[in-house]
Amino acid sequence: MGETSDVLRVEIEGDVAILTLNRPAKRNALSDALIDALAAAVEAAQRTSRAIVICGAGEHFSAGLDLAEHAGRSAIEGVHHSRRWHAIFDRMEHGPIPVFSALHGAVVGGGLELAAATHVRVADEGAFFALPEGTRGIFVGGGGSVRVARLMGVARMTDMMLTGRSVSAAQAEAWNLCQYVVPGGEARAKAVELAQKAAGNAEMSNYAILNALPRIADMSRGDGLFVESFVSAMTATSPEAEERLRAFLDKRAAKVGRPQ
Ligand code: 1HE
C-alpha cells in the first residue's frame, strides 16, 4: 500500500484506501510533491484496494494549483506540468477501481479538476466551487476544459472562468458538478460508505462501468450500442457474475431497496 508522506495521508479501511491531501496550512494547494504522492498512492491502491476516497485535511478540499511553484515556470515547463496532471488524472479516471471524492470548503481551480477526475463527488453543504484562473492570468491545465466542461456545460464553465464567481454546493449539484450534498462535516463518511458499497461489486462490472461508460459517451450512438453489447456479454460470463445471478435466483442476495 502507498506510504503516508508529509503531504498525503494514506489510511486503509477494509477494501477502501482513503487518501487525504495534507497541506492544510497552504489550503491543500497541489504542489508537485503532492501530485507525485497522489500518483504513487493511487497506483498502489489500484493494486491492493477495491475503491479509493480522496479528501482534504483542514478547512478546505483544495485551493488548486500551488501558485507559488507555478510563478516562475517557462511555457515548455508549463506544458510538461499540465501533461503530468493529465496522465495522473487519466490513470485514475480510467483505472480499475472507483474513486470517490469528499469535498468541503474550497474546491477551486485544480482542486475542482482533481475532483472532476474522480467518479463520484460528495460535497458538504458548505463547500464552494470556483475557477479563478481568469483572475490569476492563467488557464485550466489539469483537464478541466474537458472534464469540468463536460460535467456542467461549456457556457457555465465560461461564466465561472470569466467572472471568477463561487458556486454553492446546492448549485453545483444542480449543475452536475457533484452527485451528493450532505450536511456539513459528513462528506468524508458518506464518501467512505459509498466507496465500501462499490467495493463490494463484481470487479469486472466496476471495470466496465469506469472504462466503458466514458468511452461509449464519446462514440456515435450506433458505435456505442455495438460496443455495449460486447461489454455486456463479456461482463455477464465471468464466474463472479454467474455466482451473483445464481445467488439472487436462490434468494440469497439482497433485493433492490426503495430510495431513502
Ligand atoms: C496558496 C494557495 C494556492 C492558498 N497556491 N498557496 N487557486 C486560487 O486562486 C485560490 C487561491 N486561494 C484562495 O483564494 C484562498 O486561499 C482560499 C479561499 C482557498 C482559502 O482562504 P483562507 O482564508 O482559508 O486561506 P488563506 O489565508 O488565503 O491562505 C492560507 C495560506 O495558503 C497562505 O499562505 P501564507 O504563507 O500566507 O499562510 C496562502 O498564500 C496559501 N495558499 N491558496 C499557493 N493556490 C493545473 S492548472 C490549475 C489552475 C489553478 O488551480 S488556478 C487556481 C489557483
Image (cartoon, grey):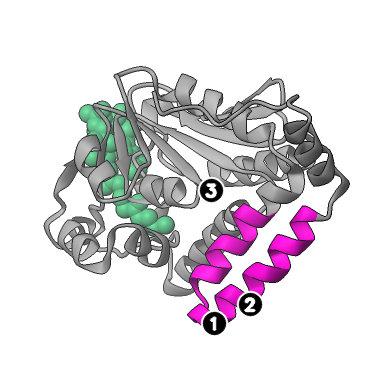
Residue plotted at (75% across, 44% down):
203
Residue plotted at (39% across, 45% down):
111
Q: Amino acid at mark 3?
A: Asp
Q: Quadrant of the N terminus?
A: top right
Q: Which residue is mark 1?
A: 222
The 10 Å Cα crowd at callout 3, few under 14, some 14 to 19, many 20 or more, is: some
Q: Earlier in the sequence, mark 2 or mark 3?
A: 3
- Determine whether the residue tagged by mark 3 lies in a helix, strand or loop: helix
As drawn, 246 above or below 197: below
Is 20 contained in the magenta span? no
Q: Amino acid at mark 1?
A: Gly
The 10 Å Cα crowd at callout 1, few under 14, some 14 to 19, many 20 or more, is: few
The 10 Å Cα crowd at callout 2, few under 14, some 14 to 19, many 20 or more, is: few
Image quadrant of ligand 1? top left
Q: Quadrant of the C terminus?
A: top left
The answer for how far apart the CA atoms under marks 2 and 1 are is 6 Å
Q: Amino acid at mark 2?
A: Phe
| Residues tagged 2 and 1 counted as in contact (Cβ below 8 A) | yes
Whether residue 254 sits left or right of residue 259 in the image: it is: right
Where residue 32 is drawn, which disc sits there? 3
Q: Which residue is mark 2?
A: 226
Query: Which residues are the magenta region?
Result: 208-236
The answer for how far apart the CA atoms under marks 2 and 3 are is 41 Å
Q: Position of residue 92 (x, y in %)?
A: 61, 51
- Determine whether the residue tagged by mark 1 lies in a helix, strand or loop: helix
